[in-house]
Amino acid sequence: MMNNPADNWQDERVSARANRLRGLKMQIWIPPIVGFGLIILAWQLYAVHNPYIIPTVPQIVDQYRTQPGLYWHDTLVTLQEAVVGASCGMAGAFLLAILMSRVRVLERALMPLAVVLNVTPMVAIAPGLVVAFGFGFTPKYIIAGMIVFFPFLINSLIGLRSPDPEVLDVFTTLHASWWEVLWHLELPTSLPYLFAAARICLPLSLIGAVVAEFSAAGQTTGLGSLIETAANQADLKAVYASVVVLALLGVGVTFVVVLFQRRLLSWHHSSRSRSQ
Amino acid sequence: MFKARTVSFTLDQARLTSWRASVHGCLILVRSPGESNLTEKRFAVRIPCCEDGADEKQTQTTTKFLAELAPESEAERVSADAAKSTDEVSMVGDDGVSISGIWKSFTNRNENTSAIEDVNLRIRRGQFVTLIGPSGCGKSTLLRIVAGLLKPDRGSVSIFGETVSHATQSKHIGFVPQTPALLPWRTVLENVQLPLQVNKRYGGGDRRPSAPRELLKSFELGDVLDRRPQDLSRGMQQRVAIARAFVFDPMILLMDEPFSALDEFTREAQRRGLLELWQSDQKTVLFVTHSVTEAVELSDVIVVMSPQPGRVQAMIPVDLPRPRDNFVENSESFHMVEVEVRRELRRTSSQLE
């Protein structure tokens, strides 16, 4: 049976499109892979000649092979501390931002306090919190929460105040309640700001958790504690193995945020390609 | 010299000599007082069944269009009356919108500027009223006061016997701002559903909220229900915004230069669309515009406002037949109203100088 020429033409177009897409994917993935490859190569070359400064790549990989349980467990602990702390901190910051956006006096009263909290180095607060709350999870949650609080508060406030005044007018003429304005207008409008903040805050919360673990090193688990203990024993292989895991964790949480962002912000121009 | 005016006018003031009508219009020959020559005028009017000798209708139509031929002196008198008391011209009953003694000033850097001074206006139920005037004449401010978005310093607004705040509470006001002001995360359909989702306590009762899907189809937006507003053209977005104001069946529509950002062709199409819609359910409309043609094409009454401070300069009734299609728009009567509006607008700017 003869093929319909129109079908052929269609097929050609489809396959051309698939080829183009494949080409595009290659364009996206190849540069970072090459970049990372070169860095690892440089690392390895340097490490071979300076064994007392950094470990070689195989030595680091070997760490995971010999003690998989240790790294896995500590990773989960740190991740949990960071995620729980950041979630509480971001939720608190968002609720406060809602109050502040409605009651100006509250903003004037509390914003200076938030600024002070932001400029105080968390590393300095951490030991005091460990003394007060012990070696459990509490001080880690608090530090991780505190470190994300300010950036999330500022972004939430800007987001909640960003609705177009004319859209607000429409809501006002409909006599929408404050809750309806929040739910149907302010919350969706602030989502791009909240996601931008979350991309900064979740990696920040990892820093918070690690700093808190440093302060209680030896008495507690987590990658921070592991690094501190290993450094005291001059175990560079364990130190860098933990650092690599932390970096991967940071990439992982950022990736999750971006995934949600793509899902929830498909309408926003930041998620749209220019051709649309 | 004749002017288009709406005045009560008796047949003996301008004697009808002869008239003949066709489907395209009406040719009327009149002899006006003080003038011996016959004057020939072509009018934009469609007279139904005129050839079949529908006598009563013919007489009515003739009387109406003879009224437009009021001599200038008569017209001037009415115009002067209009400036003196706006209330008398529109002759409104209790169930219209009444704006009485509105004053509003704004304070900016310790400087008090008066935006509106003593504006009185009555709008009948089902009337299409346009506010026109140069920038800073307070027309948008007045609209925002009627919408309850601004509080007047003095004076009151009554919307079908209710206060503004009560009218917004009961969702009696449909507001169409200058930009479409749609929610980009909602589809076209969801945007139009919004007024039905907020303030749910009201909107039932004697109201006839339209089904959003059907309404959008009548707005020729049936194919884009699931698209997001940012994927549509500006003209289509504006139509969605108007549909959103229509969907909950408000008693009055307040439109703040809704077509000002559109190009001329789109504007014209939008005007026609709005007129068609308005004619099907005759909502009361208060419409702010910069465009004289737009005002004449749409309105029953044009309110010309003068700036600094905003006052009502003149109220010009537009007694052109509807639907106002190309034929009406190209007619002499249409242009005469335009000329009058322009003249009033020039007067507002000459007052400034």
Image (spheres, coloured by chain):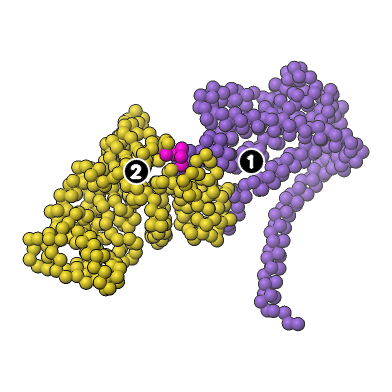
Chain colours: A purple, B yellow
Residue B281 disc label: none
Q: Determine whether the residue tagged by mark 1 lies in a helix, strand or loop.
A: helix
Q: Which residue is located at x 83 percent, y 28 percent?
A: A221
Magenta stretch holds residue B168: yes
Left or right: A240 as drawn, with respect to B10: right
Q: Which residue is located at x 33 percent, y 60 percent?
A: B322
Q: Residue B319's x, y, as percent?
A: 27, 57
Q: Residue A51's x, y, as percent?
A: 86, 37
The answer to whether marks 2 and 1 mark residues whose Cβ atoms lie closer than 8 Å is no
Q: Quadrant of the C terminus of chain A?
A: bottom right
> What's the magenta region?
B167-171
Residue A195 disc label: 1
Q: Quadrant of residue B46?
A: bottom left
Residue depth check, mark 2 versus mark 1: number of the one nearer the observer: 2
Taking depth in this image into account, of A74 and B258 the one nearest to the observer is B258
Q: Determine whether the residue tagged by mark 2 lies in a helix, strand or loop.
A: loop
Determine the residue located farthest toward the right in the rendered image: A66
Residue B95 disc label: 2
Classify B48 as above or below B157.
Answer: below
Q: Residues within 10 Å of mark 1 (few under 14, many from 20)?
A: many
Q: Which residue is located at x 54 percent, y 24 percent?
A: A106
Which amino acid is tagged 2? Asp
